[in-house]
Image (cartoon, rainbow, N blue to C red):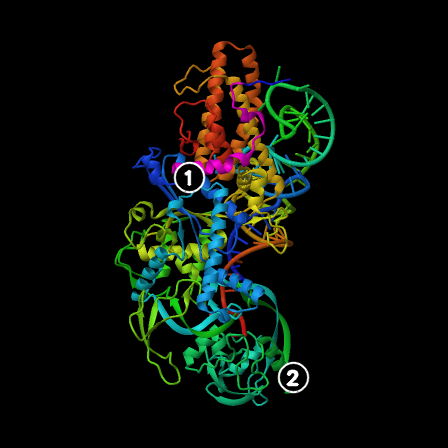
RNA sequence: GGGCGGUUAGCUCAGUUGGUAGAGCAUCUCAUUGACGUUGAGAGGGUCAGAGGUUCAAGUCCUCUACCGCCCACCA
């Protein structure tokens, strides 16, 4: 039997098919210019003097493809953006990618080594950079396509890259100003050296894994008066002193005595010193001081003017005179020294203790503390801030970077959600030490420091120590520092480097500080703190008013998704299978800020059903309202419909309040229920009776109510499920309607 | 060693300012070829981790305990 429903578009006769509409709609939004606030104003969709909402996209690393975490981030930020746009704000959401220095270079190096067996020095700086850039470009293109697939309403006309020319200019300016203010300096001291990546890394890039270690108690030699204890016997060939507490009665008498010892084939000279840092109750109450390979010992050495004796090289191998140890890997050397101690009958005790192993975040290499000449950002050095609009920090006052970072959050200029992370942030600031920003890799912003050459016969690269900060060579006889900057140095500038800084652009004036920063809580220190540092210092203002942290996306059983476990759900696969709207809903419903969320294919499937439900709700509404058009001035509602409108208004008020509080997990669920349980299951059912046996006035009233309520559902749902709502919107019998993306949020 | 989060129906989680427990999925029963089976109606299922306290009243506030998870920390 043929089924005719002439008043509704034929597409509603079959189930909702996301594939057919998603790409088409995204392109239309883009072509119409609705992602760009200037275009919105030009087209009259936004008022020129409307309030501003701005946000930067945390730039994905150009190391590969998007994962579920990115999909979550894009969804939340797109909800914020679409909501504010519909509320009439001049809304800007800026896209971009991050060159991710070490992460990208080590990934490409890994591929080259696997395929060609070559290492970076076999290939050379220029060729490696060419290959990394090529990889980054391909990665970028795929990331951009995937981002569009999620429906992200980003203003692509303002797209940025942390390593492009404009950002390079910002990086130079930032470096120069900080150098001139004495906040960037070069110094020889202990760094975290990653032997695998062959570079320094910052304190934040260390990952501690819990394990056990051996704690050895021994004497350097039979006639040495004091026993010491250590977990790293191999470093003891670099010892220059034994430190004891100055008031320790056991050892006081030895202070300032000196000994020459042959230790495992190495001649060492030990002075006994008194230092307050030593805890008499721990171990033997005496510390073997190895200044070159321990930060604590380095500081003791500085206080007592002790020499520095490096014994481990950049490859984590011993570099000593001892034939027994020279050239051996650190782990081998440890065994050799222990064996030697046993043979010499010097080992007194061997205990197993819990111990943290520091590894490099990106390469997994075991980090060695080594002394190196590096560039640093001084966080505790006082300077005069010229201009500040930070609450509690006056222009012209003397502050430290740490003060600024603390003030931005403590003053409330930046609010962190959920607020428990404010404490985490404060605590981190308290422990913060100077930030090592130079990296011995090639992919990144090369440090704009030039050294004056003074070649000698031994060393044609000998420099005088004179330094110039310059974009280009200061002239003949200067060489540029070969190192590059920590990737977080450039991403720290992101909120304003994307808006044209260091130039005083309209964008910078209009959109900075940004309204919200939305990101994962795992980069609170790496990125959020560094952005606050850079913005407060360079612009005298906080970079964003609100920080909203989302959690980690986990698999259905709560474990982290990882390729090795094979439990990765690819967001794009899911979009293809169930539609982007379903993926977005599944990531949002029931996931509060800062909480990790579990996702599963079942959950995504459930929301595909929801998209289809909306589709069929529309089919019913359109077919039962026939040729009715929504009348904006209609007010002859029946008693029953007036009640329903009151309920609808209360509902709108409720969810609008929750949107303002970022409670998307609640709003999405509530609209879902309103649409399904209230509107479809109850209201549509009783409408059937009205249409069958009501008066004309009741029918007319109900038709208007159904149309207006469906419009309300589509509008409020649009930030969450932009595609299905926009697609339905095109068929709504409403005169002079705009695209849903720029329709007014109903209140 | 510090700090933080979690512990509510079989599973995943809500529960706003304290007023005798909610949703989705799952399970079971029933219905229905007129919007939708990607459906509808209904049912079962929880001493809200444990103990103590405040209160007329506590998942909800306070204290302690247990387990799970995370973050921070240069004790050699």
Q: Position of residue A497 (x, y in %)?
A: 35, 53
Q: Position of residue A566 (x, y in %)?
A: 63, 52
Distance from the alpha carbon under mark 1 to that under mark 2: 74 Å
Q: Is residue A739 left or right of residue A359?
A: left
Q: Is residue A587 left or right of residue A304?
A: right
For the residue pair A440 and A515, the one nearer the viewer reads as A440
Q: At 39% across and 69% down in the image, what residue appears? A: A375
Q: At 55% across and 84% down in the image, what residue appears? A: A226
Please identify, in this view, whether the residue under mark 1 or under mark 2 is nearer the observer. 1
Q: Main secondary structure of the magenta part?
A: helix
Magenta highlight on residue A14: yes
- Residue named by callout 1: A30
Q: Position of residue B25 (x, y in %)?
A: 64, 36
What subunit carries mark 1? A
The mark found on residue A290 in the picture is none
Among the 4 quarters of the image, the one containing residue A88 = top left
What subunit carries mark 2? A
Sequence order check, earlier mark of 1 and 2:
1
Q: Position of residue A149 (x, y in %)?
A: 50, 42
What number of labels is visible?
Answer: 2
| In the depicted structure, whether residue A541 falls above or below residue A368 | above
- Residue named by callout 2: A342
| In the depicted structure, whether residue A34 falls above or below residue A340 | above
> The N terminus of chain A is located in which quarter?
top right
Residue A361 shows up from this direction: no
Could you tell me which secondary element the residue under label 1 belongs to? Answer: helix
Could you tell me which secondary element the residue under label 2 belongs to? Answer: helix
Q: At 39% across and 55% down in the image, what residue appears? A: A531
Give, as a single range, the part of the protein colored magenta.
A6-33
Residue A466 shows up from this direction: yes
Task: Answer few, some or many: residues within 10 Å of disc 1's Cα (few below 14, many 20 plus, some between 14 and 19).
Answer: some
């Amino acid at each position: 039997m043929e089924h005719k429903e002439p008043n509704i578009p034929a597409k509603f006769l079959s189930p909702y098919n996301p594939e057919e509409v998603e790409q088409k709609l995204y392109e239309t939004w883009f072509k119409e210019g609705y992602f760009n606030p200037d275009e919105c104003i030009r087209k009259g969709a936004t008022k020129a003097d409307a309030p501003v909402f701005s946000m930067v996209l945390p730039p994905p690393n150009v190391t590969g493809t998007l994962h579920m975490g990115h999909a979550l981030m894009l969804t939340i930020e797109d909800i914020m953006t679409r909501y504010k746009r519909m509320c009439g704000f001049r809304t800007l959401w800026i896209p971009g990618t991050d060159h991710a220095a070490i992460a990208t270079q080590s990934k490409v190096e890994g591929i080259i080594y696997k395929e060609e067996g070559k290492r970076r020095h076999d290939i050379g700086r220029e060729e490696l950079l060419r290959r990394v850039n090529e990889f980054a470009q391909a990665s970028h293109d795929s990331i951009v396509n995937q981002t569009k697939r999620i429906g992200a309403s980003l203003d692509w006309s303002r797209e940025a890259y942390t390593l492009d020319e404009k950002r390079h200019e910002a990086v130079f300016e930032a470096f120069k100003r900080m150098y001139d203010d004495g906040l960037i300096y070069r110094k020889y001291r202990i760094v975290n050296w990653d032997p695998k990546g062959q570079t320094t890394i910052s304190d934040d890039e260390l990952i501690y894994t819990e394990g056990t270690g051996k704690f050895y108690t021994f004497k350097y030699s039979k006639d040495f008066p004091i026993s010491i204890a250590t977990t790293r016997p191999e470093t003891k060939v670099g010892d220059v002193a034994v430190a004891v507490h100055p008031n320790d009665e056991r050892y006081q008498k030895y202070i300032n005595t000196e000994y020459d010892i042959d230790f495992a084939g190495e001649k060492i000279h030990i002075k006994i010193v008194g230092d307050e840092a030593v805890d008499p109750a721990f171990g033997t109450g005496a510390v073997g001081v190895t200044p070159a390979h321990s930060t604590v010992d380095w500081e003791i050495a500085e206080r007592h003017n002790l020499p520095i004796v490096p014994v481990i090289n950049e490859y984590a191998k011993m570099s000593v005179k001892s034939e027994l140890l020279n050239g051996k890997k650190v782990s081998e050397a440890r065994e050799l020294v222990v064996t030697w101690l046993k043979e010499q009958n010097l080992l007194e005790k061997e205990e197993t203790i819990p111990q943290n192993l520091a590894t490099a975040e990106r390469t997994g290499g075991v980090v060695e503390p080594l002394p190196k000449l590096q560039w640093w950002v001084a966080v505790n050095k006082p300077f005069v801030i010229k201009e500040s609009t930070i609450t509690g920090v006056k222009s012209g006052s003397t502050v430290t970077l740490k003060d600024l970072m603390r003030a931005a959050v403590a003053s409330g200029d930046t609010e962190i959600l959920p607020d428990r992370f404010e404490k985490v942030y404060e605590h981190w600031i308290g422990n913060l030490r100077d930030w090592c920003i130079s990296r011995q890799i090639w992919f990144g912003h090369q440090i704009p420091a030039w050294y004056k050459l003074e070649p000698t016969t031994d060393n044609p690269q000998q420099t005088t120590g004179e330094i110039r900060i310059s974009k280009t060579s200061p002239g003949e006889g200067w060489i540029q520092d070969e190192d590059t900057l920590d990737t977080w140095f450039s991403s720290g500038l992101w909120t304003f480097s994307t808006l044209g800084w260091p130039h005083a652009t309209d964008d910078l004036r209009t959109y900075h500080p940004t309204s919200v920063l939305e990101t994962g809580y795992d980069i609170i220190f790496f990125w959020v703190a560094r952005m606050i540092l850079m913005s407060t210092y360079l612009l005298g203002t906080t970079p964003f008013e609100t920080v909203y942290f989302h959690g980690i996306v986990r698999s259905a059983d709560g474990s982290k998704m990882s390729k090795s476990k094979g439990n990765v759900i690819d967001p794009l696969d899911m979009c293809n299978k169930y539609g982007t709207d379903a993926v977005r809903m599944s990531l949002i419903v029931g996931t509060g800020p800062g909480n990790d969320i579990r996702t599963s294919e079942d959950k995504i499937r459930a929301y595909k059903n929801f998209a289809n439900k909306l589709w069929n709700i529309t089919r019913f509404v359109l077919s039962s309202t026939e040729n009715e058009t929504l009348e904006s001035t209609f007010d002859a509602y029946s008693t029953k419909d007036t009640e329903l409108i009151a309920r609808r208004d209360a509902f709108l008020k409720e969810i609008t309040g929750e949107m303002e509080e970022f409670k998307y997990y609640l709003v999405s669920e509530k609209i879902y229920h309103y649409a399904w349980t209230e509107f479809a299951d109850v209201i549509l059912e009783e409408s059937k009776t009205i249409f069958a046996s009501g008066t004309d006035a009741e029918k007319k009233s109900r038709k208007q109510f159904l149309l207006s309520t469906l419009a309300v559902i589509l509008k409020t749902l649009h930030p969450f499920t932009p595609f299905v709502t926009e697609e339905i919107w095109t068929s709504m019998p409403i005169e002079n309607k705009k695209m849903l993306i720029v329709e007014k949020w109903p209140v």
